[in-house]
Amino acid sequence: MEKALLVGICFNKKEEENIKENLKELFLLAKTLNCQICGEIIQKREAPDPKTYIGRGKGEEISKIVKELDIKTVIFENDLSPSQVKNLEDMFGCKVIDRTWLILSLFAQKAKTEEAKVQVSLAQYEYLLPRLTKQWTHLSRQWGGIGTKGVGEKQLELDKRAIKNRIDHLKICLKNIERKRDITFKSHKNFPRVALVGYTNAGKSTLFNFITKSQNFVSPMPFSTLDPKVARISSGKIPILFSDTVGFLRNLPHHLIASFKSTLMEAIYADIVLHIIDRSHPNFEEQARVGLETLENLKVPKDKIINLYNKADLIFSNENIPFPYISATKGWGLENLFETIEKNITEKFLIIKKKFPLTEKENLKIFLKNNCVASLKNINGFYEVDVWVRKNPYTF
Ligand SMILES: Nc1nc2c(ncn2[C@@H]2O[C@H](COP(=O)(O)OP(=O)(O)OP(=O)(O)O)[C@@H](O)[C@H]2O)c(=O)[nH]1
Ligand SMILES: [Mg+2]
């Protein structure tokens, strides 16, 4: 475990109100990376100090704590410029990282599939590139990372050119992986799609598991899911594809959002986007705002989004809860949810009939596999299939 100190600086009344919750979140992120948090420092300022962000007085106070407690990393809630990081590291004599780098390191640690790994590495290098200045040809201690994965210690001496090459290479890798994903995506495109999105820890995977009876990783730590999982379920008569996605976070580094865009395609192309909100969280309104803002950035149309208030079991004492409350652990409110989903899908899809001669069994098989079938009958020497089709088909 690495001993760490958290620092948050607020510049106005609103930031002052939120700083406690923001540091709590930073605490959870750092803990997920195996840091032992030894304390929190909060400072109010009029404006950031251009050289050190916090100013000399506070800097000296932190330096003292760092020495006394043998702190190895000081983690800033605020984003720092490369020169501020360097000045602070000189002042404290230990590693200094900001929230963005902490999140990137966390994603690097959690990435399991090849796609997630490539996406995170790309985001890390793109974050690093503009931070390499001429007089600063080697990377500062910060880039050694925390929980050291992805851009690791051995790459500390990488120069700008090497990083640029690496970025180009990762982009090619990502394109190839995306191509494969695209093929799978298109083969499923005729089915109604429902995507679960929302702030990290809101309960997306829990709901996904409950509905699809699968075993996605659920954990009280943030960013348990980095790779989308898709499963097919039948809601009443309609087969639906459900997908679990990566969680959102306040000020998620934009490199990361860009890299994860293909993963988030599940949400972009879904017919219904279930926006899961942890209604029991003291900051649920802010988390919901971040969720909706991220969806807006991804250009997800508003009319596709259904907000759901999860963790209702922490608010109500029994399952008689009004929509849009649900409890993913207890399965409360899901009847209402499915009613809403079905109503929504029947508005967006219509049933058409398709006929296959009895001799075309093979074609029928392929058709059944790739389409959302409502019923299949054998009538007057034909297979007659009722199939759900989207009123406004995708244009790829
Ligand atoms: N009490 C209660 N806890 C819940 C409910 N839904 C989820 N949780 C808990 O919330 C935590 C996070 O759940 P996950 O399903 O991993 O959340 P997620 O949205 O998938 O999180 P990321 O994948 O990290 O973005 C876990 O400890 C769950 O057990 C609920 O309805 N009630
Ligand atoms: Mg999850």
Image (spheres, grey):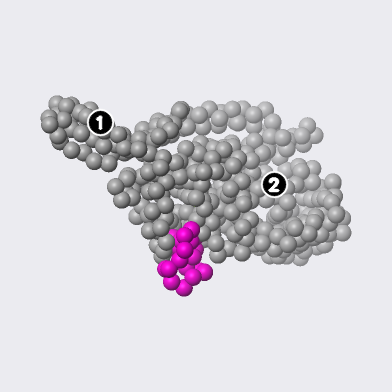
Which residue is identified by label 2?
A: 142
Give the position of the N terminus as an image quadrant. bottom right
Q: Secondary structure at mark 1?
A: strand
> Disc 2 beta carbon < 8 A from ligand 1?
no
**Amino acid type, callout 1:** Lys
- Residue 157 sits in which quadrant? top right
- The stretch in magenta equals 310-329
Q: Is residue 129 magenta?
A: no
Residue 335 against residue 175 in the figure, above or below? below
Specify the principal SS of the magenta part.
Answer: loop
Q: Residue at x 49, y 65 (%)?
A: 312
In the rendered structure, which amino acid carries the disc numbered 2?
A: Gln
Residue under the image location 47 percent in, 54 percent down: 204
Q: Secondary structure at mark 2?
A: helix
Q: Position of residue 387 (x, y in %)?
A: 29, 36
Number of the front mark, 1 or 2: 1
Q: Which residue is mark 1?
A: 354
